[in-house]
Amino acid sequence: MPRFTIFKKILMSTLLLSLVPLLVSSIILLFNLQSTSTKLTAEIAESDDTQSSEVLQMRARVLADSVSDFLHQCENDLLFLSRSRLDSAALLNFYQTRRSELWLRSGTPEAPQESHELVPLYRSIALIDRTGQEKLVIANGRIVSPSELRNVSDPARTTYKSEEYFRRIRGLKRGEIYVSHVTGFHILKKEQLAGAGDPESAYDGKSYQGVVRFGAPLFNAGGGFAGAVVLSLDHRHLMEFTQHIDPGKSFSTVFPSYRSGNYAFMFDDEGWIVTHPKFWDIRGVDENGRLVPPYSEHSSKADIDAGRIPYNLDYAGFVDPSYPLVASEVRNQRFGYVDITNAGGAKKIMAYAPIPYDSGDYKKFGVFGGVTIGFQADQFHQAARRGSRLIFTQLGEHRTTSALIILATALLAALSAWLLSRNISVPLRELTQGASKLAAGDSSVRVAVSSADEIGVLAGTFNYMADELELRKESILATLDELRKSRLEIMDERNFQKSILESISSAIVTLSPEGTLTSINGTGLLYLGEEARLGRCYREVFEGWGDLDAKIERVLASHAGYGRQALRVERGEGMTHFEIGFFPIGEEAAKGLTVILRNETEKAKLQEEMMRLDRLASLGKLSAGIAHEVRNPLTGISLLLDDLHDQAVSGSGDQLLIKKALSEIERVERLITALLNYSSPARAAFRECDLNRVVSDTVLLMRRQCERQQVRLTLAVGELPPLLIDPDQIKQAVMNMIRNALEALPNGGSIEVATARGETARVCISDDGAGIAPEDLPLIFEPFFTRKGAGTGLGLSITQRIVEEHRGTVRVESVQGEGTRFTIELPLTPS
């Protein structure tokens, strides 16, 4: 327990008696005044914030509902048009009758002018045929001449160089519509400002010219895709919802003030701003049709100066963390308000609300996006600031008086403490200097203090400690030198052993006589994973390794069974082959057991593959020989039976028997042809092809056969790049798969064919038949294996050979009673 010396007692008593009561009373008083001021200011500000924020929230929700109604109106226009007679007169009448008012400004900042004009809702209306060729377009109040019509199936030929609305519409079903995101050429800062200082003063600048595409497919009488009708909503009508909102005293304005922070803007479900007083904040594409990247903390100075920085709330967290939060809340269809600072530095309260809409591209979140209304925060708190200024003035005067009193008292107390401690501090300083020298390594230092109080006792103890340290220092140095030599020898030995163990490709695990893990090398950790922790029982370490734990238990218990043996374990994607070894540590395993595991899977697979290739090569040679030897006499027999059939009496029993014999000969002929095709396959002619088109053609060929058997055949294609394949061989492989599935559905059912892209191009053929027995799965790709009464058993073998020639793989998954799925995987790039 520390002792309170005389110096400490005098110093502490003086300071406590003089300063503490005064400090405590002053602090309590100041705290109470500060607390009262803070609470009063906060209550006034909170009341103003709550009332104003609720008003902003309500206005934002009403505005969001108005935008939602407007979008549904456009959707209804599209559906009406898709079900109407589509000739030039009807479309022109529709275009001219769909108008809405725009509040526009003109003139100059010194002589501003305003006007209200009725402007068509849609920038254009287009009727497109099934190939993507525009047949009729109305734009700018007139019918576009045939020489100006484009084929919009090529995105590069669309208005904004990269639009894919025709492809998207072509994939829709009857009753479905396509709604795009806002698309338009991005406006640079200098293009809008045109020399003005801010957007509010930019009367002669360039305006954002964008659209939202609404499209619906058209179908012919047979239900086939016949084309599309597309309405291009003029972006200015969306801008009209937010451009004239002023949350301040004016309530509305022809163009809002960005610097004040009192304005509204709209953003879509991807976080992109789509209406804003700063047109360069609106999402857009460059002259090549590429989407301009969003403004972020990584944007270059050149892009910022040029205004090549459209705003995406998800990337604007570096401006204010509330921007990504608002985007997330809107996508979750929640409304509210936040305190925020915009890119111009204006601090404001911003209310937000989601725009309910779930058509086209907006199904994912069920919202078109959100609207926000911002109001400058300083205007909320004027009443609170007036009250708090009065309180802070009085509080400041009290602080000044209290500080002067405390300062005078502290000076008197400090002077008294210094006079009392001076006679004590000098000998203590000498003792401290001696301790510092001792700590620096000078063990010969000693201190001389003549007083008999606590300091004298401390000096005597210090000198005794210095004597002891001198003796023990010499002893410790000698011991440390010996330990250092021993440690280096041990580390060299351990590193040598560890490097040997880590360089071995086999897993080496040691167990104690009780069966707990005592060491493991890197390969062992790779095989056994997190379960291999030191101190764990071998049953936990080797859990899931078949009967390996039982083998270890027998070896540990019997001290016998040492040596190497094979082990097969089901791990991951298939059966893994290991060679395991048990070796004792010490006499009769007195110090434990060493377990060695070596992965022999690749060796086993190579052996199996060599056996399979040898077997297939022999089978091919044998099949070719048999086929050639049988075909010649079979042809003679067939000709003789044809003559006998012609000579037999019409309708006699002999003629029927001969006809049946000819039918059986034809079946043998087909079998021989299949054998020859299998033994001497045609070499693949690779060329760049559309795999989706090859699969679609194959499905079309098999559809009639499936309908006759009451089997529903469906196709779902994904986006795939052109592949280097032999289309005829791939078509044969897919057709073999569909035929196998069809034969598994004698009483009807369904077959699904789908293409998709991952690390490879995939073709999946699934049926809901009886499935394949587990014991047959390893044999289905073997030549001549079949469970059907008819058939050659070569279909899947030929399919596997075709896919392997394309450097691909075939996988099968089957559950009895539920169905079977075959998956063909082809490389995206030629190897």
Image (cartoon, rainbow, N blue to C red):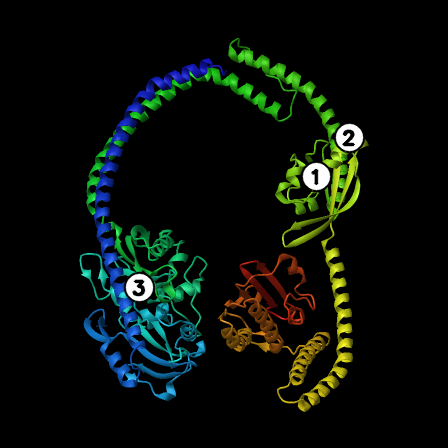
Q: Is residue 50 left or right of residue 662?
A: left
Identify the mark nearer the N-term, 3 or 2. 3
**Dot 1 and dot 3 residues touching (CB under 8 Å):** no
Amino acid on which the number 1 mark rests in the picture:
Ala
Q: Residue at x 72, y 33 (%)?
A: 512
Q: Is residue 97 visible?
A: yes
First reached walking from the N terminus: tag 1 or tag 2 = 1
Residue 62: x and y in percent read: 23, 58
Residue 682 visible, this angle: no
Instruction: Name the residue nearer the viewer: 821 or 297.
Output: 821
Amino acid marked by disc 3: His
Q: Which residue is mark 2?
A: 590
Decide: few, some or many residues near mark 2? Use Cα within 10 Å; few <14, some 14-19, many ≥20.
few
- Label 3 sits on a secondary structure element that is loop
Residue at x 69%, y 40% (from the top left corner): 549
Is there a contact, CB below 8 Å, between mark 1 and mark 2? no
Q: Position of residue 332 (x, y in %)?
A: 35, 54
Q: Which mark is residue 276?
A: 3
Which part of the image, by quadrant, shows the C terminus?
bottom right
The numbered disc on residue 550 is: 1
In this picture, residue 492 sits left or right of residue 341: right
Q: Earlier in the sequence, mark 1 or mark 3?
A: 3
- Judged from the image, the secondary structure of the residue bearing numbered disc 2 is loop
Question: Looking at the image, is 51 positioned above or below residue 540?
Answer: below
Q: CA distance from mark 3 to mark 2?
A: 82 Å
Question: Which of the two residues, 416 or 590, is positioned nearer the viewer here?
Answer: 590
- Quarter-wise, where is residue 202 in the image? bottom left
